[in-house]
């Protein structure tokens, strides 16, 4: 386990699991039943997400060495040699692509396009402009589309437009919360961040405003032909209100200087619960 841990950290396994989970939510919105294909979709997206993360760490290994937050990663810490990282990353991308191609060429193509957006567009843009968060948000919006098309759904259907848009909206405050916590680290490495233009309180207000927009959008699911069980719908509404109140408290009332970490975790938990409820609703 200890020997394999650098490889798991190379592919950012927790993040890759979350990405695969969002793809699975898209799959179940089309095909509301447990199936072998859903597992193939999950594994394929996990491996491809891990491969993209591996490429990212290969690209940014020198920058990672400059930041306290990332200096412990496998490459800057030399827990992995460069050839090992390259080989493992390639294996992840090849195996993940094969799995998705077994389902359909469209999800496989979407996944490869997403890798290009993440590694060819977003990663270099971080050094140039604060607007890199736009392609960064798009990277988070595509996985549900991968799952949706893997189950045979059309990309023009309102339901997948809703889920992809929700995922896009939810990425933006994540970036900004990280900027509040690691802004000086990013600047030390020469990355462009919004903290160069706004102070912490302004970023907090912007984050909360964006969270409100995302939460209101979440409640608009009936417009996008998503049919929710009445019990699930009530739970989603109540959780949405509780989340907004809790997030407000963490940002503006909590006196703990380390408030950003629990606020960040809270947003991740809430989105995970919402995706889980959508999956459960599809299985009912």
Image: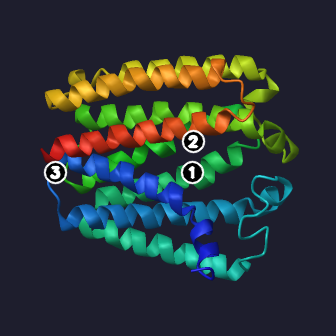
Which residue is tagged 3? 31
Which residue is tagged 2? 136
Displayed quadrant of residue 47? bottom left
Q: Is residue 129 visible?
A: no
Of the two numbered discs 1 and 2 on the same chain, state the one appearing first in sequence: 1
Residue 86 lies, with reference to residue 184, above or below; the image says: below
CA distance separating discs 3 and 1: 28 Å
Residue 275, x across and y down, in percent? 33, 42
Q: Secondary structure at mark 1?
A: helix
Depth check, front residue: 229 or 61: 229
Q: Are marks 1 and 2 in contact (CB under 8 Å)?
A: yes
Q: Quadrant of the C terminus?
A: top left
Residue 34 lies, with reference to residue 28, above or below; the image says: below
> Dot 2: few (<14), some (14–19), or many (≥20) neighbours within 10 Å?
many
Which residue is tagged 1? 118
> Dot 1: few (<14), some (14–19), or many (≥20) neighbours within 10 Å?
many
């Amino acid at each position: 386990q200890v020997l394999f841990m650098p490889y798991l950290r190379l592919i950012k396994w927790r993040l890759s699991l979350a990405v695969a989970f969002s793809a699975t939510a898209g799959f179940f919105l089309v095909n509301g039943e447990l199936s072998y294909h859903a597992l193939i979709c999950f594994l394929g997206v996990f491996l491809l997400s891990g491969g993209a993360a591996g490429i990212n760490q290969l690209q940014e290994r020198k920058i990672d060495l400059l930041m306290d937050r990332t200096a412990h990663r496998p490459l800057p810490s030399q827990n992995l040699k460069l050839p090992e990282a390259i080989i493992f990353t390639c294996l992840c991308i090849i195996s993940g692509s094969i799995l998705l191609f077994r389902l359909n060429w469209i999800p496989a193509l979407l996944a490869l396009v997403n890798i290009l957006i993440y590694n060819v567009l977003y990663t270099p843009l971080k050094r140039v402009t604060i607007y890199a968060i736009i392609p960064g948000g798009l990277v988070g919006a595509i996985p549900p589309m991968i799952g949706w098309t893997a189950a045979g759904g059309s990309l023009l259907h309102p339901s997948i437009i809703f889920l992809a848009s929700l995922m896009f909206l939810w990425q933006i405050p994540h970036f900004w919360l990280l900027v509040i916590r690691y802004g000086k680290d990013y600047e030390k490495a020469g990355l462009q961040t919004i903290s160069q233009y706004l102070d912490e309180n302004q970023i907090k207000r912007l984050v909360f405003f964006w969270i409100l927009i995302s939460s209101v959008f979440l409640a608009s699911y009936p417009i996008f032909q998503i049919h929710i069980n009445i019990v699930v719908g009530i739970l989603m509404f109540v959780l949405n209100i509780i989340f907004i109140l809790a997030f407000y408290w963490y940002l503006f009332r909590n006196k703990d200087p380390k408030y950003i970490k629990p606020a960040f975790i809270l947003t991740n938990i809430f989105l995970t619960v919402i995706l889980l409820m959508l999956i459960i609703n599809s299985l009912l």
